Amino acid sequence: MQRKTSMKEFEPYGSVYEQPVSFEKEDMISRVYNLVPQRNINQLLHFDCPVYLEMESGMAALVVGFSTELDKLKTFSIHRKVQLKPGVRFSLTAIGKEASCRLITTNGFAMVCDELPVPFFFNRILPRIQIKEILGYYYNIRNSGYRFRGESHDYYEITYVDRGCLRTTIEDTEYILQEKELLVYGPGQFHTQSIAEGESCSYVTIIFSMENLILRDQDEENKLLLNKIFPYDKKIYSLIKSFVQESSSQLPYLNTLLLCLVQEIVIRLLQSEFSDHKEERPIAITRQHYQDELLERILSHIEENICEPLTIAEICQRFSLSRSSLQLLFKENLDQTPKKYISDLKLEKSCQMIRENKYTLSEIALMLGFNSIHYFSRAFAQKYHMAPSEYSKQMFDQI
């Protein structure tokens, strides 16, 4: 967190006061500094008498220390009136577009300007990247033997595998994306996609333009983003899930929200090289082992009985769990409710049954325990953004 001049940590350097200094009556002099944003601080001032700093507009960062040693300098946000003790070295830089500060001291002051041996870097909170536009986003459901011959374009493209396995090549290098894995294609990269025989795959595609606001970082960021497979990450999974869910919303500011979600996804991907994935789930090893075994048994039971009437109460009774314990188990490990998991699994099973072409849509709805064909169609469309009849047509048009 940022430091403020009202914190105890500022006390060695000075203090905050409320009433403006009456410099006209107390033999005081002043001048106004018009401040601009600076990334590098090259010099520090210090006086042999107290100095009063009164912000007249905007906000500023105050760099202070007792020497020119960079590792001993500290930065505080200043938007109040501050008195600095004699001998404290300091510099000011605007936060935002611009600011102005009145510096007040005594008539008989002595001031020294110290050049820093190397510039002090002020870390302004500014974006390094910006998602400018989302050109397309799709939830793709591909059947056995699917082949996309390939393309290249001028944009970034995220491919996230929801279910199944996707094979892709980038400039003749092959990558195999397993479930919950992600890959980013870069501008100008020729890429293909395919599904092996006997398999199917559902995956999310997001095509977007991105501006690198610090041009010297662009090559480094591309090294972190491109030509690699990103494994499952709980935060990124939650963001992708939110993107898919929100994309069907009709609420105001939807486009801005989608841009923000993609921006956070990209930032998390860039950070993943530097984060410790072992700390992602702070659960004791023994507890996690117990949870893994219990969850595996519950998921196997759900999968084996997906065509039977499944209720939360029945699952809780069968595995001697309270409803809240079951909810927590799914939330911590799958980041969704048991009810949502069962519904998604039923819909995935419905896709398989549609591809098998043995039953009508009404029969599939009945076999999977949906209340009606209308409820089944609505749930299917919410997840896959198409009606079951459209999905069936798409599957068999590919044959």
Image (spheres, rainbow, N blue to C red):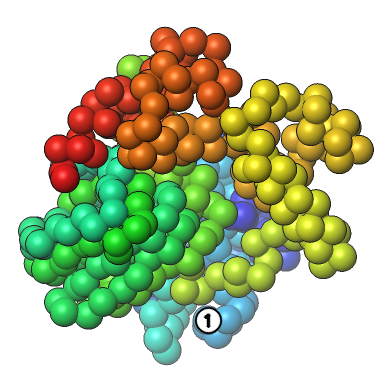
Q: Position of residue 73 (x, y in %)?
A: 57, 74
Residue nearer the viewer, 24 or 44: 44
Q: Which residue in the structure is indicated by mark 1?
A: 70
Q: Which residue: 81% across, 25% down?
A: 313
* Residue positioned most to the bottom: 117
Q: Which residue: 49% across, 50% down?
A: 237
Task: Label 1: state its secondary structure.
Answer: helix
Residue 32 visible in the current orientation? no
Q: Which residue: 36% across, 39% down?
A: 356
Residue nearer the viewer, 390 or 59: 390
Q: Which residue: 40% across, 86% down?
A: 118
Q: Position of residue 381 (x, y in %)?
A: 36, 24
Residue 183 visible in the current orientation? yes
Q: Specify the quadrant that holds the C terminus.
A: top left
Residue nearer the viewer, 17 or 198: 198
Q: Amino acid at mark 1?
A: Leu
Res 318 → quadrant: top right
Res 245 → quadrant: top left
